[in-house]
Amino acid sequence: MAQFQFDPAPMAYIQKSFTSPFKFRLAMFSQLPLGFWIGMRVRELNENRCVVTVPYKRLNKNPFRSTFWAVLGMAAEMSSGAILTMFTFKQKPSISLLVGNQTGKFIKKAVGVTTFVCENGQEIKAAVAKAAETGEAVEVLCPVKGYNAAQELICEFTFTWSLKARKAA
């Protein structure tokens, strides 16, 4: 089978749309309303990494005066999911995505803006290509680290994404 080739036009579209504050907020409002309300933002998205921020605010906090763990998890998932979306959007064959497992470790309270960084874009790209070439299910581990404004590590997440090429209709 021929080596899978990524179409760069849809990838560029996703990069531009996710990093545009207006377009991203509009997409969040229509497709993921909680993402809109919590104030999640994609600050950087490229083939190697994605950076997502989420603020500490009234809607996002828990009774213990820190950001609710589920808010942190949503932003962490977006940092890996945005890379996957970029590599799979309008590609041929179409690739289905599913989070098969997730783990989280909390080190410090999140009491300000939390910045999530996923830096395994090349591993994700290779997994998408393998799924497209073989038609078999492929899993990729996506470690994500969350930092506070002082660049202190406050949490770590790992998402196991399952990818599979859809059969042509």
Image (cartoon, helix red, strand yellow):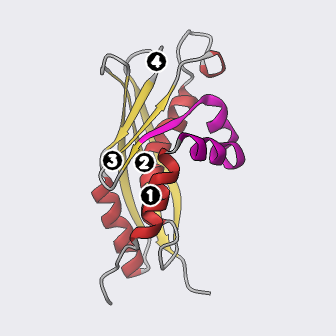
Residue stretch in magenta: 21-43
Report the amino acid beneath label 3.
Arg
Asked if residue 32 is among those painted magenta in the image, a careful observer would answer: yes
Give the spatial CA distance, label 4 vs label 2.
20 Å
Please rate how many residues cluster around mark 4, counting C-alpha atoms within 10 Å: few if below 14, some from 14 to 19, many from 20: many
Q: Amino acid at mark 4?
A: Ala
The answer to which of marks 1 and 4 sits earlier in the sequence is: 1
Q: Which residue is mark 2?
A: 80
In the image, 129: left or right of 103? Answer: left
* Residue type for callout 1: Leu
Asked if the residue at tag 2 contacts the one at tag 1, i.e. Cβ–Cβ closer than 8 Å, the answer is: yes
Q: Amino acid at mark 2?
A: Ser
Q: Is residue 57 above or below residue 34?
A: above
Neighbourhood count class around disc 2 (C-alpha, 10 Å): few under 14, some 14–19, many 20 upward = many
Confirm or deny contact between disc 2 and disc 3 (CB under 8 A): no
Q: Which residue is at a point 54% across and 77% down the rendered structure image?
A: 166
Residue 73 drawn at (x, y percent): 51, 35
Compared with 124, 33 (above or below) is: above
Q: CA distance from mark 3 to mark 4?
A: 22 Å
* Disc 3: which residue: 49
Q: Tell me the residue that label 4 is attached to.
A: 110
Q: Position of residue 51 (x, y in %)?
A: 39, 39
**Image quadrant occupied by the C terminus:** bottom right
Q: Judge by depth and name the residue closer to the eye, 62 or 48.
A: 48
Q: Which residue is mark 1?
A: 84
- Residue 16's tag is none
